[in-house]
Image (tube, helix red, strand yellow):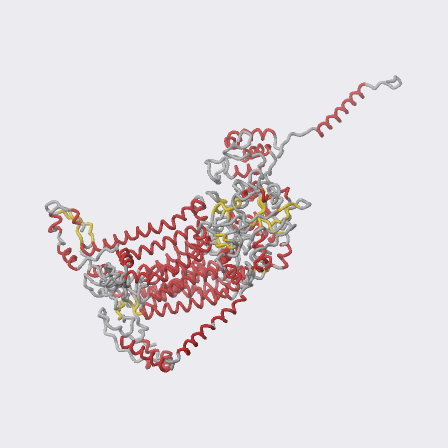
Amino acid sequence: MTTAAKKPRRPARLALIGACMFVLGSAYAVVAPTTVQADGGAPAEIAAGKALFTTNCSSCHGLNGEGTSQGPSLVGVGAAAVDFQVYTGRMPMAIPGPQAPRRQNTFSASEIQAMASYVASLGPGPAIPQPAQYDPAGLTEEEIAQGGELFRTNCSACHNFAGNGGALPNGKYAPSLVGVGGKEIYEALRTGPQQMPVFSKGALTDTEARQIIGYLNELHEQPAGGFTLGGIGPVSEGFWTWVLGIGGLAGFAMWIASRGARAR
Amino acid sequence: MSTSDSRQVERIHPVPDPGIEEHLPRWTDVDEGAATRVTRQITFMFGLVPLLSIAFVVFYFAIDRNATVDFAGLHAPAQHTLMGLAAGLAILLVGVGAVQWARLIMSDHELVGERHTMASSDEARRVAVQQFADGVADANIARRRLLGTSFAGALGILVVPALVTLADLGPWPGPGMRKATIEKTVWAEGVHLVTDVTFNRIKAAEMEIGQLINAQPEVFKDMAHEDPAQFQREKAKASIIVVRMDPNRIKIPASRATWHVGGILCYSKICTHVGCPISLWEQQTHHLLCPCHQSTFDLANSGVVVFGPAARSLPQLPIKVDGQGFLVAQQDFNVPVGPSYFERDSRNDYQEGQD
Amino acid sequence: MAKPTTVAADSPALDSTTPTQAPPLAKAGGIAGWLDERLTIGALSKHPNALRKIFPDHWSFLIGEIALYSFVILLLTGVFLTIWFKPSMAEIEYEGSYQLLRGVPMSEAFASTLSLSFDVRGGLLVRQIHHWAAMLFVGAATAHMLRVFFTGAFRKPRELNWLIGVGLLSISLIEGFAGYSLPDDLLSGTGLRFVDGLVRSVPLIGTWAEFFMFGGEFPGTLIIPRLYMVHILLVPGLLLALIGGHLTIMWYQKHTQFPGPGRTESNVVGYPFFPVYMAKAGGFFFIVFGVTVLMGTFMSINPVWMYGPYNPAEVTAGSQPDWYMGWVEGAIRIMPNWEWHLGGTTWSWNIFLPGAGLMGLLFTGLALWPFIEAWITGDRAEHHLLDRPRNAPTRTALGVAGMTVYGMFWLAGGNDILATMFHLSLNDVTYVMRAAVFVAPVLAFLITRRICASLQRADRNRVLHGSETGVIVRTVDGRYYEDHVPISDDEAFTLTQHAEYPELEATPAHDASGVAMKPLVSKSRARVRRWYVAPYVGKPTATEIESAHDHGDHADDPALESGDRKALTH
């Protein structure tokens, strides 16, 4: 270094150091790796979720959600699966059996969110959907009619033409969809709870899922030609034929013949 | 008491016949006031009928089509309900009134009628037999038996041409016709698999384990509009389901090692029992249940029957991926799809344990 | 119109005003006279006695009328439906008023059914009335057949009418199936697919029958128009003809009657056709019609718009046929998967046996029963008095066993509904039903026979000892007995009026010199006869009744004297 240049003054040196620090700090902030979170939940929420999980779920699903002989692995099932199962009261499963029935949910929304975030952190999976993904508002009549076609091709074989549910082998069943919210249906489609297969976005887009939900909503509002007698088709129709029809008319017959010498 | 005459039937009446019961008059027979009351009731019922009929006509024209009745669990169109109620009550009241009239006002004296044995008297039989004999004699057929038999034969044989005219009821399902119809489907090398209803091609890499897709051949996209009748016939054979399972958890025989794509298998959707479409798939057990008669197939074991009345395993369609990663068929099914028939050669269907 | 008050011959019960002599019909003015001058309708008063024909009065005789009136209702509502229904499988895109199927491709048949349901005023009402009437028609025909069976009304001379009835029942099943398949909806189309598989599976001729029925492969474009022809022309024509025959025979032979005082095998006691029976039966027509209309109003049936149009790639959980086909459905479901693969042929016993086999068995058995029973009992007499079911215990037990088998198959047809409704395993229900169809009817037979025997014994006790009063009397020396009141002569006669069948001895199979000959009564027939009459409890004889009434005062009863309590129950 030659002495021809003048030495920099003190305040300028400070400013230069500050500028370098700023530049370096920003560069670090940009390139530094973020913590791995599939749903981007806050660490506090995940910790709360882990605590709830340990208490309520780990006995069957393992301390780290890796699965045991009592319950499958939850790695990769996603927040949507937790939201669906816990919100509908199916999980925690009260009694082991062929299927977890729908029950009263006892967890608050924030608790479910916490558990969902924790499970989501175990591995990437379907996220809890936004209303735009499952709300059928804005669909045209033709689209909702196509929802009916999709429903009858994909869903009615298990859930029945009106969503009243159906039988599966060995004590399992496809539950009724009457009164079930769009968010639940969407989550069930994407996560495939228990025996239900998965219907992923590649084969059934969000719009198509909304069409199915819209169809079901409107179908359940439709006026029927009278009392629906259970909505399970010819079996109940045959039952009432005999009970009310033949029974009632036989009653009338007994009334008609209730006079005359023989009747005394 | 035993007897060898099979016609012997005991007809002893230990209690003598007391004769028809004494007729007891009804209250309406005895009491003038009661009779008048009942008559008024009946007339009132008949009188309601025109009112209900008018109500029916009013309902027919005046009620808004879209109005509904919502009452005690009933959610039905108002016009339908009110019209039915009016008509039903009107008709019912006619009947109830008539029956009340018969029960309470009309004479209820029981009368006795005579029965005659069904067999005609000996005399009548003799006359009938004689008449028949006279007729036969008049026909002069006595030594001309051929006349009678040829007549009967001529009449009888006319049935044959009549029946033969029904021979065009349908095409004759000989071996060639069967090969061209029930023994083949539209699946062939290179035909793309597409989602049912929406006709989108299926990317193998996007299928998740546990996923089920109800699918069709892509050729249906155009056939649906161009030839709807043929479309329905082909759909009844070519409908398929695509499922993805973990290949390490399922049984894939050596003969079918090339039929799947990384655990994505394709099966016929048409049950081998009587042809209902099946898509009741259990993700965890890999069983496929037909809702019609509960035949159950194990898709993790080449579609063998594990329960129910189906006798043959579900046909599997060999698939592969094309250049862009979409699923395509390699060939048609190797066995006829759907329900059994007599001429079906069922030796090529997959048997349990086969390799 | 003239009102002749002619009285039927031999009417001992009439004690009221002397009947006035009827004026000759020709003197009557108006239409009656006009017709009489062309058709001799006045002669109707004699052979047959038309206007004043006697009809016995019992509520169970009205069940067949439910079927008859339902048929009339079906004809009336059916004509209404044909005005709008289009029996065509040509495909269109729906643009009607039911929003949820907008733009969906469907057949004209389905679209016209939607139009009937939503656009034609009263269309849904008539559709539903029509379908309920069809269910009632088959149900009432079945109930009527059971009534006729259990009361032995099929015996000579009514075997022909029984055969006509069995024929009516069997073709009504086809009629109903054809009818509900016409709208071409998802549920009935699935049923048609089943029939396609069923027909196809028939050994030797299956593919031919299938191709001829559908005009080629399933579904084709011909099955709906063909079923339409069957449903509105062919079968109704057959039904009308058979119903006409059924009623004519019944009219000519006169209706049967229950045993009772004054009722014999050679008379008929009841009310005259005009006016009483006409009013009761005619009134019942309006009642049946009214009830059916109200059912069509308030009870939803076959909501085809919810099922959607038929699509061979779609199906609904809980697919069942209408109730009267449920038993065949059940048989198909629980049948094990027996199929023979012989060389290049396939023999589908799993479909053919429960399908064609079982239906053939039922209707053949039903048709043959009157002749089988006549062979067993050797009864060649005419019967116009009905049996009380308890007095024909083996027949009744067989009938209940038959109903039980039918019921088991019917339950099996709804095995998935049973599973979901009662939280059972579908597979377990199927296994249980496989056993139940064999075990349950045997149990039912044994239990029913026992019950009939006890009822007969109870009747016998009533005749001998009278009616229990519930009044306990204590005698001076401390014995207790229940007071009985003798039953009326009317009741005693009714309870002892039935016929009894003595045992048959097998006649020798060889004559005196050892040459074999055909026995009058074979060993097997004697054995069957013994089994058939085994549960009969004999009627009390006249002397037994006499002596039973003699010791009406139990103080004199020697059994009481000796303190032998068992003898008291006789």
Can residue B36 be seen by looking at this rendering?
no
Residue C532, quarter of the rendered image: bottom left
B338 and B207: which is toward the camera: B338
For residue B133, above or below residue A53? below
Q: Position of residue B109 (x, y in %)?
A: 26, 67
In terms of depth relative to the viewer, which is nearer, C525 or C30? C525
Q: Is A9 situated left or right of A25 in this image?
A: right
Quadrant position of the N terminus of chain C in the picture: bottom left
Is B131 on the left or on the right of A133, as rendered? Answer: left
Identity of the residue drawn at 17% across and 60% down: C542
- Residue lying at the far top of the rendered structure: A3
Residue C320 shows in this picture: yes
Where is residue C275? Give x, y as percent. 32, 70
Q: Is residue C161 above or below residue A58?
A: below
How many tags in the picture?
0
Residue reaching furthest to the right: A4
Residue C16 image offset from top left, x and y in percent = 23, 71
Counting from the top left corner in percent of width and height, residue C13 is at: 22, 68
Q: Quadrant of residue C160?
A: bottom left
Q: Give the vertical position of A119 relative to B343 (above or below).
A: above
The residue depicted at 46 percent of the width and 72 percent of the height is B157
Q: Nearer the viewer, residue A182 or A96?
A: A96
